[in-house]
Amino acid sequence: MLLPRSADATVHDGHFELVEGAGVAGPPAIVDLVRELLPLPTADGDTLTFQTKPDQRLGAEGYHLSVTPDGVTATAATEDGLRWAVQSLLQLVPDGASRRLPCVEVTDRPVYPWRGSLLDVARWCHPMPFLYRYVDLLAMHKLNTLHLHLTDDQGWRFEVRKYPRLTEVGGFRRESPAGHAREGREDGVPHGGFYTQRELSDLVAYAARRGVRVMPEIDLPGHTQSAIAAYPELGNVPGRRLETRTTWGISSHILNLSDATISFVLDVLDEVVDVFPFEYVHIGGDEVPTEEWRANPDVLALAATLGLDDVRELQGWFAGRLAEHLAGHGRKVGVWDELVDRAAPAGATVFAWQAEHRVRVALDAGHPVVAAPQSHTYLDWAETVDDPDEPLAINGPLPLEKVYGYRPGAAKVGGEERGAGVIGVQGQLWSEYLPTTDLVEWRAFPRLAALAELGWSGPGGDFGEFRQRLAGHLGRLDRIGVRYRPL
């Protein structure tokens, strides 16, 4: 019936007629949300009642929803729980003119506290209205975190008022790859754009009303060619001028680690935390080639002063500096799993992407982990490689069933399952081959719905039963015009 699958649901005889002008009572934020999302006008009253009350069984995001012939009642320990009750109620509203809701009792709570999706807006600057739409799609599936990848070699999308060239120069590139990057063809079409701090603040507030947190990522110290193009003094070769990268892949140009560069980065992070109130800031740390550091005498001298055996260890030192600074703002850091091998800051949450076993590596190192292995959660991968009509993708295949069947941290070590410490799951949509919003939706759905069920209901569900519910759920996506990949 519901997607994600509810922990406990019972359908009773009878129905409730949701009529125009039905009364809504509850916390003001929830009443406003109901009036915004329900497909008919409502008024004050108690036909639909939402209330918070202590209930340890429901946790921070659980809820109880009751639909009887007389009305709707939802209870939760927090307003976050009530928000998910609203989303479940919306799923019960049938298509067409009928507003007959089945009489049901639903008790539900998520298995994982982190249920997210990464959207890469650095490679292609998708328009702000789509980011609002994407937030709505996450909330619809009870996904509570939008991970915005805001900066990369090919574009800097976050307005930094102290350093305007980051967007004036780094936000634009001369052209982009045409076809697959390995073909070496370019399209000759300039691309660029960025989001102002006001635009992002408004998006964050909109998402919060729907129970979705927005985590910014400023990827450091690699994936920074756009920043070095804007401010050449950030690079490792004095006097060299770069352009914002026009090809995909990993740039060899990374930040130097001078005091001035670190001050620059801390200034950027100060503006980031002013816009994004979420407790996490993701500082990247992935795919950092160190050849430029090895050729930079200042970096070599820094490593020697710190007593490090290899310049690669400077990654951990650098991340530690950023984590310490962000802690002063009351923030925690997220990092990619390469940092586990480079002395990731204590307490950093690791996003384990490289392979399934990296989840266990990060857990064994004592970090909370968001499971995001490319083999199961990189939704920009093609679903199949056998269909000639499948759009161009960086890799594949990643079929729907494989996403649904992922068991985070479940591989056994010494005969014991090592899943404890996994705080959630996240589906990634890297955008090298997703230049349009239609392609983003095509790649995201329905696989993101499968990942949402994994995050909310936990692993081990029946895929056949899921597909039956998914077939009905796709009708909801049809009604709001989502360009999903047909089953």
Image: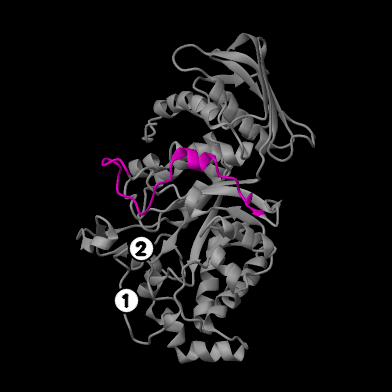
Few, some or many C-alpha atoms within 10 Å of disc 2 (few <14, some 14-19, many ≥20)?
many
**Quadrant in which residue 460 is drawn:** top right
Span shown in magenta: 386-412
All told, the count of numbered labels is 2
Q: Which of marks 1 and 2 is nearer the N terminus?
A: 2
Would you say the residues marked 1 and 2 are in contact, meaning their CB atoms lie under 8 Å apart? no
Q: Residue at x 49, y 64 (%)?
A: 218
Q: Which amino acid does label 2 sit on?
A: Gly
Q: Badge 2 is on which residue?
A: 171
Left or right? Give the position of 135 relative to 115.
left
Q: Which colour scheme is used?
A: one colour
Q: Badge 1 is on which residue?
A: 242
Which quarter of the figure is the C terminus placed in?
top left
- Circle 1: element type: loop
Left or right? Give the position of 37 relative to 431.
right
Which quarter of the figure is the N terminus placed in?
top right
Q: Is residue 311 above or below residue 410?
A: below
Q: In this view, does 375 lie above or below 58?
A: below
Q: In this view, does 15 lie above or below 308?
A: above
- Residue 332 in sight here: no
Q: What residue type is labelled 1?
A: Leu
Q: Find residue 76 and report its horizontal and vertical position in percent.
A: 72, 32
- Circle 2: element type: loop
